[in-house]
Image (cartoon, helix red, strand yellow):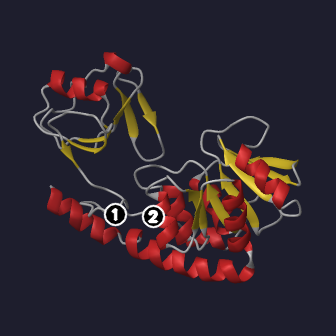
Amino acid sequence: MTVLASGTPGSQTPDGLFDVLGIGEDRALRWPDAVPVDALVIIDDLTEEVDDLLGRAGVPAASYLTAPADHRSKWRWLPVGADGRSPLLSPYVPVSEVAARHRHRGFGFTGYQLVLAGGASGHDPPGPVAWLTGAFHDRDIVVVADGIAAAWKGRALRGRTSVDTRMDLWRLMAHAAVCVDLDPGRLVARECVEALRLGTPIVVPEPAEPAATHARAGGGSTFGDAAELIAAVGTLSSSGGRAVASDSGRRYADAAYGDPERLVGQLKALL
């Protein structure tokens, strides 16, 4: 498999699984000579620039996972994920149960409220985190953003530690009371599924599909404003509420995303 992405043409960047091949930027994308145009082509996000590249390269057929709502192209949509439609592919989302045995080395406490802040950065917590620190001033809140986990309590920063590997993130998830994902992915919402498979309930923004689907199906919650976020986190952080949601979420996520053999069968049928 060859993975193509924006970057210096011909450059190779390891991402932990593949050597990602650079194909240029914006309108200057270039199809690599070493990659046959009649290969099975699957596009992550079908932008105008990618559509133009496929046409110039003479790619005869391709499938895409996501595209703008107003796009017009001849390529085939490949349904994936949990948006209420029947997917052609049901992704396998792996986690390691080892993460549940040992907490993250950077913190000496567990049972915190974990917030995945997406693209947020800087020293100040995002608005929703400020709401939580104000409402739960006696609770630890760990915010993950830009590869750093920051621990807050009563609006005071207690410390920071790096999140260097997926195992680091899984350990943070596994030992949290609840996981709030402020910016879940719009295709699978992988971190939400990982948290559920590790037995941690999730809380996500109401419009965020498919994360909202995961929350509803897995015993978690969605929120539309500060009051709803605080109420959801409070309920799921309690021992009784968390225990019920943890069991429900784990069963849902394992059934929907824990079977690699099903994905292999689906890929075989697609090919």
Which image quarter holds the C terminus? bottom left
Is residue 60 shown above or below 133? above
Q: Which residue is mark 1?
A: 84
- Locate residue 244, reporting x and y percent: 61, 83
Is 42 on the left or on the right of 176, as rendered? left
Q: Is residue 13 visible?
A: yes
Residue depicted at 44% across the width and 55% down the height: 209
- Locate residue 172, reporting x and y percent: 68, 61
SS category of the residue bearing label 2: helix
- Residue contact between numbered discs 1 and 2, judged by CB atoms under 8 Å: yes
- Please tell me how many numbered marks the rendered image carries: 2
Looking at numbered disc 1 in the image, what kind of residue is underneath it? Gly
Q: Which residue is mark 2?
A: 213
Is residue 217 shown above or below 165? below
Which of 174/120 is in front? 120
Mark 1 or mark 2, earlier in chain: 1
Q: Is residue 150 visible?
A: no
- Locate residue 234, reporting x and y percent: 74, 69
Looking at numbered disc 2 in the image, what kind of residue is underneath it? Thr
User: Residue 97's quadrant in the figure?
Assistant: bottom right
Tell me if mark 2 has few (under 14), some (14-19) or many (20+) residues whose alpha carbon lies within 10 angstroms of its own: many
User: Residue 245's quadrant in the figure?
Assistant: bottom right
Is 152 on the left or on the right of 254, as rendered? right
Residue depicted at 34% across the width and 63% down the height: 84
Tell me if mark 1 has few (under 14), some (14-19) or many (20+) residues whose alpha carbon lies within 10 angstroms of its own: few
- Locate residue 14, reporting x and y percent: 46, 38
